[in-house]
Image (tube, rainbow, N blue to C red):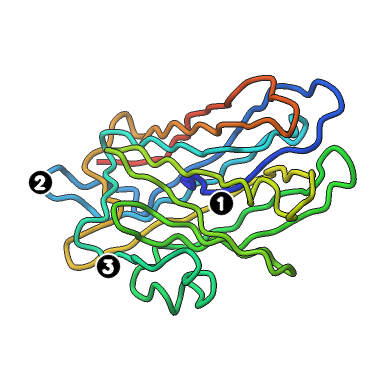
Amino acid sequence: MAAGAAAIALGAAGVAYAQNPAGSITGTASVSPTKAGTKSKPKNVKLTLKVTNDSASKTTASSIKIKLPSTLKLSTKGLKQCTKSDNVIINQTPAKACKGSIAGKGTANAVLDPGGQRVPIKFIVTPIVGKNQLLFHLAAQGLANKYVLHGKISGKTLTITITKDVQQPITGSPLYSALVDLTSTLSLKSGKNYLLSSTGCSGGKHKIPVTVGYVANPTPPTKPSASTTLEAKCSK
């Protein structure tokens, strides 16, 4: 599953038969170009995030929260926003339903039944600019499963909600899925309107806190969430 967020994004964890280690995440971040803009002259940037979940924790994700620093701005203003329903996006594909609103690309890896057979699932992730939000279309490779996750934008924070059908991708099955890793690249511009822009650089790094929330699967997680701070190199 953020950034990508994300979702960014997707479920994580499995049927737990014993207490698992507390969840933890690691990751990397980068922006291109690295030379920053200013508040008066923001510079369009491409943001790439990778988040890896500790597989030993067998945790199921309920959300991915990405908080941008003061030197990066996230905005859908002035961009073509896709307002189609989730079902239309899934049935028509993002390229047809949301032409002009595609905001990058990504992948996500998960395992079904991480406490047992550990069946791998790979998703192709398509970020889409929605109305004051980012949407993430997930298409499982080799399977018919497709989903749309919603990423709410509030100030500099993007919060991607992981839905129940992603947490438990087989209808009627008690098995959960466990996030392995996700990678997403975000960028879109229209004239002087940018989805992501840099307005400065502090200490040679953009510091980006990421938090993954967990849900019972069915055993409650040892901790409700795991956090880390990613650093993307920059220069003035």
Quarter of the image for the C terminus: give it: top left
Amino acid type of the residue that numbered disc 1 sits on in the rendered structure = Thr
Q: Amino acid at mark 2?
A: Ser
80 relative to 222, above or below: below
Q: Which residue is mark 1?
A: 183
Residue 80 is tagged as 3
Q: Secondary structure at mark 1?
A: strand
In the image: residue 165, left or right of residue 44: right
Q: Residue at x 83, y 52 (%)?
A: 119
Above or below for 140 versus 54: below
Mark 2 vs mark 3, foreground winner is 3
Q: CB of mark 2 within 8 Å of CB of mark 3?
A: no
Q: Earlier in the sequence, mark 1 or mark 2?
A: 2
Could you say where residue 217 lies in the image, as x and y percent from the top left? Answer: 72, 34
* Residue 6 image label: none
Is 34 in front, or is 9? 9
Viewer-side label of 1, 3: 3
Compared with 15, 146 (above or below) is below
The residue wearing badge 2 is 40
Q: Residue at x 78, y 54 (%)?
A: 120
Residue at 32% x, 62% y is 188
- Is 125 displayed left or right of 109 in the figure? left
Report x, y in % for residue 218. 74, 32
- Amino acid type, residue under disc 3 in the picture: Lys
Looking at the image, tell me whether mark 2 or mark 3 is earlier in sequence order.
Answer: 2
